[in-house]
Amino acid sequence: MQDSIQQMKQLDFVKSQLTRYSGERKETGDRVMILCPFHSEKTPSASINVGHQYRPGQFFCFACGAKSSWDEVAPKLGLEPYKPGPPKDQSSLDLFMQRGMERLIENDGFEHSKFRFFDLPKNKMWRGIPTSFLCDLNGRLCYKWSSNYEKWGQTKFIHFPVVINKETHGYFLARLKKDTSDKQLPSYLLAKSTGGFNWSKLYGLWPFDYAIELMHSLKKKTIVLVEGQRDALRLLLNDIPAMCVFGTQSWSQNKGNLLEIAEVNRLILLFDGDCAGKLATSRMISVTEAQFKVTPLELWSMKGSPYRRFSRFEEPSKRAKKEGVNLWDPFNMPQCIVNKIKIDYF
């Protein structure tokens, strides 16, 4: 009886906290779908439990597989834990850093899945990107085996390996076609981590080898970091060394070390021109400025940015969406900004 009362109190607390959540959300029965704080996305793919039959506030992301209790995820959402206490040096998702590199030798770091692969047709376009370029990044069409139904799935994906220094450390799947249904399925699926560590946090920089090779060919030591995969692709097509970070909250010292070993000494932060991008830029400056020279490019404040029209509102991004206005990101920003980045830094 006491446990039931305690659970009800915690459930009420979680619900009241979620009313303060500023990101995009969608209520579906006993779940509240939100934007995952552990990887970059624009459509909610993470679930917060608000039902009575399970632990209130339990978090799970259907896209990247991250999971945690309410007390672990709440601070990452700008909300309060149910049982506040002294801050921990590391969250549970950082514990793999303490277990040493031995785990990497014992386990490849991501869950193996069965795929049926096909070559991408060349001279076509995928969401504005030439398929011939995707082939250069080892992109392949695939069907994924469904363990639940013991058959091949019907959804066709593009499979991209995440390669660091010629070694594959993970992969992600991109939907061949953008989901337009009411389900709003995530555009990208990350390989699930295994072995007690999160591969995307340890090695989540894509496409690392291609971008570093381009940087060296330009005789520069600068890399542009962006949130999403298509953002990186657009810049690379314009001969700008760029890579996505799979979520700004998944940054780790290991990622910084990989860039430093590759002779990078300057990071240009080019995140989305919305509220989340603004917050992410501030956070990334604080965790990278001790290791690199950091230059933030603020899409939300640039001349002509649609964000500026809504800056007087309490939640500019939500207001813009309500009025049907698309805010800038590195993929849809004007070409003149791309040209200026290339001239100024490369």
Image: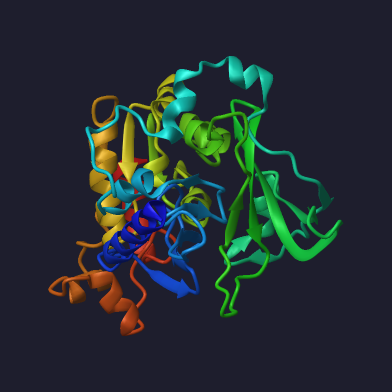
Where is residue 98, by image quadrant?
A: top left
* Position of 45 relative to 327 (above/below): above
- On screen, residue 144 versus residue 241, left or right, reads right
Q: Is residue 346 visible?
A: yes
x and y, in percent, of residue 95 in the image: 45, 27
Quarter-wise, where is residue 18 in the image?
bottom left
Q: Residue at the far bottom: name it.
A: 323
User: For this view, does 247 lie left or right of residue 132?
Assistant: left
Where's the C terminus, which quadrant? top left
Check the image and report above or below for 315 versus 195.
Answer: below
Vertical relation: 273 (above or below) 268: below
Q: Residue 122: x percent and y percent?
A: 75, 59
Residue 166 screen position, x and y as percent: 64, 27
Q: Quarter of the image containing the N terminus?
A: bottom left
Rendered location of residue 109, percent (x, y): 63, 30
Numbered-mark total: 0
